[in-house]
Image (tube, helix red, strand yellow):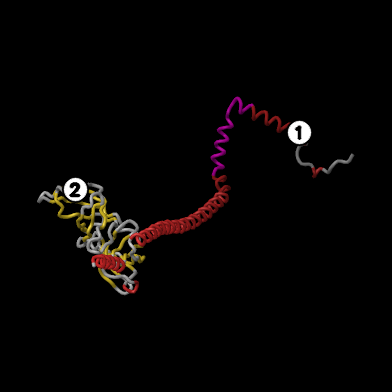
Amino acid sequence: METAPQFFRHGPSPLARLFIFAMLSCLLIAEDTHFNYFPQLRQAIGVIIFPLQRIAYTPADIYDQVEKFITSFNLLEENIKLRQLYLERREQLLRLDALEAENTHLRRLLGAVQEIETTTKTKVVLAEIQYTPRDPFNHKITLNKGSYHDIELGQAVIDDKGIIGQITLLYPWSSEVTLLTDKDHAVPIQVVRNGLRSVISGTGKNNELELRYLSVNTDIQQDDLLVTSGIGGVYPPGIPVATVRKIEQDPMGDFALVTSTPIAGVDRNRQVLVLSLAQTESNDSQEMSTIGSGTN
């Protein structure tokens, strides 16, 4: 049997190596069990090689930091896009809510138009509020309908709930409305409960009207409904104006201080109705002619 040349032999045989490492393992186990010197040695070695470990981990740490930066940048960009999308969707939702409210108001106006035209035979023109004053003490609004659209001075303006005001200034394609709450505006009214007639006036506040010069013993109560009496021919009779909110006695005299709240949205909505006076006047003239012919 041929043997390898001497210069190809490297160290002990495999069996000798197995025996040596087995003995070394047994010694290490025995030392670790009874003498407990190696944990301290391992700690010392760990302190020595810690900088080398940090250097070895540096590329992985750099890679993690770069990955986190890229991820955070992507998240920030995605967050901006989602925020923008949310605002766009929110704006669309608000527009839908506004359109839904406007459609509801228009349906109510349509019902009011049909009721008015059926009961009073009065012509009704639908108009939209074009301008509102910036001055809180100026209770006037501008409509997008004028003389070109058969609007006339003195016509009543209402919404689906009640009286808003009266046309006081006229242009070809626009008109100005003095609101019910203007301090120089007055409306002849009637109490639905007992038929009491009076005049209600504005106070310059959006949610307040006054019944003036009523004696303290006048039969009027809180929550009484006030409607137009039709006296004067400006406002058709029976249109809601206000409800009585508070009744007090004037300490300076014998009159009662009656404060009311407008029923109509004098400071809300965009669409209103303008009631024609011509039809009402023609009806009145026809009635007078009928009465006159009957008398003859």
Residue drawn at x 15%, y 50% as measured from the top left: 256
Residue drawn at x 81%, y 42% as measured from the top left: 6
Residue tagged 2: 219
Q: Is residue 228 left or right of residue 11?
A: left
Quadrant in the picture for residue 279: bottom left
Residue tagged 1: 16
In the image, is residue 42 above or below residue 181? above
Camera sees residue 6: yes
Q: Earlier in the sequence, mark 2 or mark 1?
A: 1
In the image, is residue 3 above or below residue 272? above
Q: CA distance from mark 2 to mark 1?
A: 126 Å
Q: Secondary structure at mark 1?
A: helix
Q: Is residue 161 left or right of residue 19?
A: left
Q: Residues within 10 Å of mark 1 (few under 14, many from 20)?
A: few
Magenta stretch, residue numbers: 30-50
Q: Residues within 10 Å of mark 2 (few under 14, many from 20)?
A: few
Q: Check the picture and name the quadrant holding the N terminus.
A: top right
